[in-house]
Image: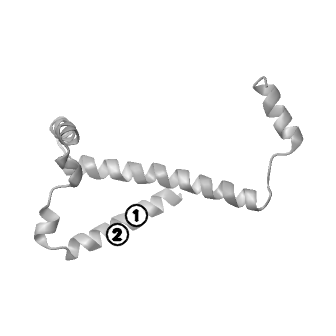
Amino acid sequence: MRTESICAEMRERIDGVAAVAPRCLRAAKSPALRMPCVRLTTERLAEKTRRSPAWHVGRAIEDYVAVNSWQLERIEAGIMAADRRDFASDDEVARVRAKFGR
């Protein structure tokens, strides 16, 4: 699946940056953890799951990217179909309208 390959690419890039980033930059807290509401929630999750707050923030970012990547792929596929003039026929539209009572 394309989303999985995007995530793998991102992980490779992040790992590469972390390997060369200054120590102070790697140790810096995530901007998300500076927001009190997010910080308290991730601390609570960390305590309950025995994972770090940074792990939860990273997971949230991965999930966000996966969801939005999927949506963008579907939008791009729809645009390409429209460019090919690949639209529903009048009969297909009539069937859908009848199915939903319009």
The picture places residue 41, in percent across and down from the top left corner, at 21, 37
Q: Which residue is mark 2?
A: 12
Is residue 14 or residue 50 the one in the foreground?
Answer: 14
x, y percent for residue 60? 33, 47
Q: Residues within 10 Å of mark 2 (few under 14, many from 20)?
A: few
The CA distance from mark 2 to mark 1 is 6 Å
* 64 left or right of 47 in image: right
- 13 above or below 71? below
Amino acid type, callout 2: Glu
Tag 2–tag 1 contact (CB < 8 Å): yes
Disc 1 designates what residue? 8
Left or right of residue 82: residue 66: left
Q: Residue at x 85, y 34 (%)?
A: 94
What residue type is disc 1 on?
Ala
Which quadrant of the view contains residue 76? bottom right
Q: Quadrant of residue 44?
A: top left
Residue that sits furthest to the front in the current view: 35
